[in-house]
Amino acid sequence: MASPAAAEITFNIEEPAEASVRSGIGLISGWAVSEIGIVSVEAFIDGESLGPVPYGSERGDVAAAFPGIPDALHSGWGMKWAY
């Protein structure tokens, strides 16, 4: 039996910005879309899981950029993190 093709996932990490240095409490956030849907998001820092991240916040900008992808409007994810 043939294996199903892997789904393509398009995502962006907005916070923390690439190559930034953080301390204290900050936000880890971004968005993710896939034609077959996103079930959950998990964040990692330096290879260590931070656990599941709340997913499904409204992102009108992402919906406008990906009008053909179901649930693109609810593609945001984010959580506070104590660095």
Image (cartoon, grey):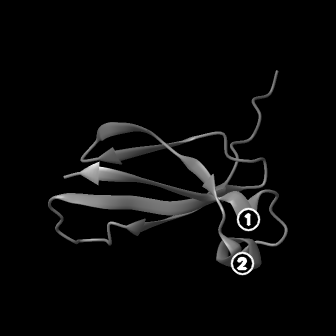
The location of residue 75, given as percent across then percent down, is 65, 59
The location of residue 51, given as percent across then percent down, is 40, 35
Q: Any mark on residue 73, and which? A: 1
| Quarter assignment of residue 31 | bottom right
- Helix, strand or loop at disc 2? helix
Task: Tell us which disc is closer to us: 1 or 2.
Answer: 1
Q: Is residue 67 above or below residue 1?
A: below
| Quarter assignment of residue 33 | bottom right
Would residue 3 be found to the left or right of residue 14 on screen?
right
- Helix, strand or loop at disc 1? helix
Q: Is residue 49 above or below residue 33?
A: above
Numbered-mark total = 2
The location of residue 59, given as percent across then percent down, is 65, 69
Q: Quadrant location of the N terminus?
A: top right
Q: Residue shown at 66%/39% (left/top)?
A: 39
Going from N to C along the chain, the mark reached first, 1 or 2, is: 2
Name which residue type carries label 1: Leu
Q: Residue shown at 71%/78% (left/top)?
A: 65
Q: Residue shown at 66%/78% (left/top)?
A: 61
Q: Could you say which is closer to the camera, residue 17 or residue 57?
A: 57
Q: Any mark on residue 59, and which? A: none
Would residue 9 be found to the left or right of residue 54 on screen?
right
Q: Which residue is mark 2?
A: 65
The location of residue 56, given as percent across then percent down, is 64, 52
Name which residue type carries label 2: Ala
Would residue 82 be found to the left or right of residue 31 on screen?
left
For mark 1, does the 10 Å Cα neighbourhood hold few (<14), some (14 to 19), or many (20 or more) residues? many
**Gap between marks 1 and 2, in whole Å?**
10 Å
Q: Residue shown at 82%/72% (left/top)?
A: 67
